[in-house]
Amino acid sequence: MKVNSLAFRLFVTAAVWTLVILPVAGLAIDYVRQRELASSHDARLSQLLTLIIAFSTDHGGAEPRFPRNVGEPLFEVTHSGWYWQITPLGSSPGRRMVSASLASEVLALPSATNVTTDSSNIRWTEAAGPLGEPLRVGEIVFSLGDEEVQNNYSYVVAGNQDFVDARIDEFRLPLVMALALAGLGLIGATFVQVRYGLKPLEAIERGLADVRSGRAQRLEGDLPAEIEPLRSELNALIRANQDTIERARTQVGNLAHALKTPLAVMINEAREERTPFGNKVVEQGEIMRDQVNHYLDRARVAAQVGVIGTVAEVDGVARGLIRAVSRIYRDRHIEITADCPPGIRFRGERQDLEEMLGNLLDNACKWAGSRVQLKVTLVEPDAQRPARAVQIVVEDDGPGLNAEQRAQAVKRGRRLDESKPGSGLGLSIVADLVQVYGGSFALEAAPAGGLSARLILPAA
Ligand SMILES: Nc1ncnc2c1ncn2[C@@H]1O[C@H](COP(=O)(O)OP(=O)(O)OP(=O)(O)O)[C@@H](O)[C@H]1O
Ligand SMILES: [Mg+2]
C-alpha cells in the first residue's frame, strides 16, 4: 500500500478510529463493572448488618445479645477478613460483642469520625484489618429501649475488599483480550474492504495500460456506478484523440499530394530550359522536393507517435528485415545472428521501426567482414527513463569508424566510404526518427572491431 494512496488513507483513518474508540470502550466497561462489583459488595454487607441487628434484638430485651448464626461461615474463621462487632455507645448498658473471626482485635467505629450516613443510615469507610487486609466497613447506630431510656449500639460489619479487587482484576484480562481481538478483526475487515472496494480502480488502470499499449481500443468491463462516468469520459477522450490524429494525417497526406505535382511540373519545365537559370531552378526544386518529402515524413511520424495504440512486434519486423538483407547480400555470405525475445513491442509505427532497423542492418551488411549481430532487449524503467524501453543493438565486424567519423556519419548526405553504393541518408533518417519518438541513437565501437549502433525506443 503506497503512502499517498486512497487505500492507505481509508485504511489509516479506519485503523486510527478503531484504536481510539476501543480503549475508550474498554475503560467505560471496566468502570461500570467496578461500580457494579463495589455496590454488590456493599449490598451484601448491608444485608449482613440487617441480619445481625435482627438476630441480636429479636428477644425483645433492652440490650442486644449475641446474635444467632447469620449464615456466613467466614465470621467463624479467625482473621478471615469478615468481621462483625456490636459496641454499646455512651453509657448504654452491655458489653462489646465481636465475631469469632475478629478474636481479640477491635474495629474502629466510623461514627467516631465525621463520616456521614447514606440513605439507609449506614456509614461506609475503608480500613485495614488485623492482618493489614483492606476492609470495607459499614456501620449502623441502632437504638434500643423505650421512650424514656434510649440505648445506642454501634453495629459494624466489615468485608474483605481483596475479594472485590480480585474479581475486577480477573475480569480485566479477558476484557482486554476481547477488545484486542475485536480491534484486530476490525482492522482486518477494513483492509479487506478497502482492497475490495478499490479493485475497480485497478481495473481502470489496467484498461488504460491496455489502450496505451494497443491491446485494446477502448476501456471495457463492468465498473461500479460511481466510476462508470469516468470510463465513458475516458473513452470519449480516447475517441477524440484518435479523430484528431486521423484528421492531421489526412491533411498531411493532402498537402503532400498537393505539393508534389506542381513541384514535379516545375522541375520538368525547368529542365527543358537548359539555361543557368533553369538549372538553378531544377537544383533548388529537387532540394525542395527532398525537403518536402523529408518533413512530410517527419510530420506523419510525429502524428503517429501521439497515437494511442500503435505498436509493432520487434521480433517479427527483425525477422522480415533479416530475410530481406540476407537476400540482398547473398553473395557476401554474411552470417546474421539475431537475439530477439518474442513479445517485445515497440510503441510506434511498424513502418518506422522497419525504416530504422532496415538502415542499420543494411549498413552493417554493407561493411561487415562476415558477421552481423542483432540484439534486442527490454529495458525496465529506472530513474532516468520513466517508461519501459526497447534497446536494439546492431553490430558488425567490419572496419568500423573512429570517434570523429562516428560523429560525422549521422549528418545528412554524409558518406565516409565512397567505395560502397549509397546516398548517405540512411543514418540521418534513423536519427530523425529516433528523435521524433523521443528515443536515443548512438554509434559505438563494437567489441568485434566493427561498428555498433544502439537504438533506444519506447516499448509498449
Ligand atoms: N556499419 C558501418 N561500418 C562502417 N562504416 C559505416 C557503417 N555504417 C555507416 N557507415 C559510414 O557512415 C556513412 C553514412 O551512413 P549512411 O547509412 O547514412 O549512408 P550510406 O549507407 O552510405 O547510404 P544509404 O544508407 O543512404 O544508402 C557511410 O557512408 C559509411 O561511411
Ligand atoms: Mg546506409
Image: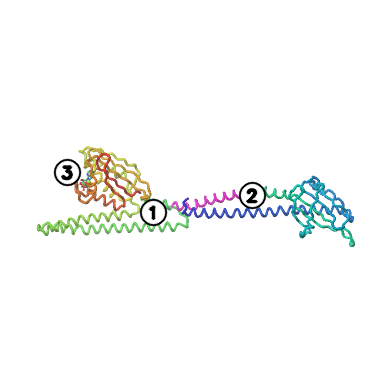
Position of residue 18 measured from the top left corner of the image (x, y, whole percent): 57, 53
* Residue stretch rendered in magenta on the structure: 179-203
Give the side of residue 386 with respect to residue 433, left or right. right
Nearer to the camera, 70 or 306: 70
Look at mark 1 in the image and give the residue it sits on.
218
Q: Secondary structure at mark 1?
A: loop
Answer whether residue 309 is magenta in the image.
Answer: no
Task: Tell me which corner region of the image, top left, top right, bottom left or bottom right, holds residue 232.
Answer: bottom left
Identity of the residue drawn at 71% across and 52% down: 37
Q: Secondary structure at mark 3?
A: loop
Answer whether residue 192 is magenta in the image.
Answer: yes
Dominant secondary structure of the residues highlighted in magenta in the image = helix
First in residue order: circle 3 vs circle 1: 1
How far apart are labels 3 and 1 at the CA level? Answer: 52 Å
Look at mark 2 in the image and give the residue it sits on.
175
First in residue order: circle 1 vs circle 2: 2
Q: Which mark's residue is nearer the viewer, 1 or 2?
A: 2
